[in-house]
Image: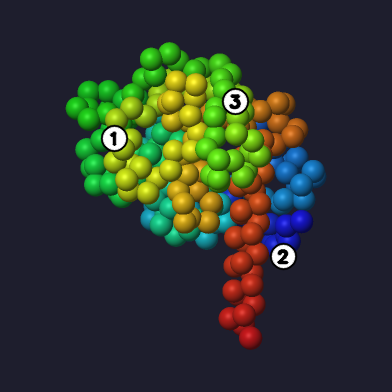
Amino acid sequence: MTNLAARPARIALVGDRSTNVVSHTRLPLILDSLAERDRLLLDAYWIPSEDAEAEDAVRGFDAVWVLPGSPYRSEAGVLSAIRTARVEGIPFLGTCGGFQHALLEYARDVCGLTHVAHAENDPAAEDLLIEPLACSLAGHEAGVTIEPGSLAESVIGAEHTVERYFCSYGPTRHLDTLREHGLRFSGHDEDGHVRIVELPGHPFFLATLFQPELSGDGSRPHPVVRALARAAVEHASRDERRMAEAAV
């Protein structure tokens, strides 16, 4: 069993909170269930995308979760939060819009593709990394095949899963470049389209085009959400140990 930190793990929920986004309304139940069922205590703070533009917006947190709800009021803020989590080794989860923007941040800041864009934010851009899906997945369920030996497989515990979507955009171009620079595409739909990405070597960096927060009724958190919570608690525990050692 995971050792709990002396303090609740602090998680930054990045996005523009809205009662019109179902995944946002699910979060209180999910957080309560993580505490009651799994003894994973998370102290959650909403950070609007505009506030996330501040350089230290998510520093000091034990996890960062970029939630659905795009277009975000500030693309720059969301990308900044993702960059901080990636560079500083903070456990990270991106779902739906968070998945799309994780790819965008990586393409620009790691691969040097500085002009790639998201069609929802900049539809007239010449080089679109994220484009409208040929068939919208809004309100759909679909199968995902997961690569053996991946973080996603260890988290979900299977090589195939059926997940819920509420999404109309996905990655199209430059995927080989993203892969060559270290990003792993660990989940695909039946047509081979990327649905899960992860970053090997990072303590926990996972993003899904599907929305695990929509699994069931929220009373039994999806394995991906539980894995983020465990990573956050472990991060908090490490911080506690470092502080204790420094005080000796």
Label 1 SS: loop
Q: Residue at point 71% right, 51% down?
A: 41
Gap between marks 2 and 1 measured at Cα? 44 Å
Mark closest to the chain's N terminus, 3 or 2: 2
Residue 120, horizontal then vertical, whole percent: 35, 25
Q: Tell me if residue 61 comes above or below residue 23 in the rendering.
A: below
Which residue lies at the image location 19% right of the left edge and 27% below the top edge?
126
Q: Which mark is residue 197?
A: none
Residue matched to label 2: 6
Left or right of residue 202: residue 44: right
At 61% from the left edge and 67% from the top edge, which residue is drawn? 238
What amino acid type is highlighted by mark number 1? His
Q: Earlier in the sequence, mark 2 or mark 1?
A: 2
Identified by mark 2, the residue type is Ala
Furthest toward the bottom, the residue is: 248
The N terminus sits in image quarter: bottom right
Residue 1 in view? yes
* Residue linked to disc 3: 163
Placement of 40 over or under 216, stated as above or below: below
In x, y percent, where is residue 137? Answer: 49, 18
In the rendered structure, the answer to whether residue 32 lies left or right of residue 10 reads right
Which amino acid type is shown beneath numbered disc 3?
Answer: Glu
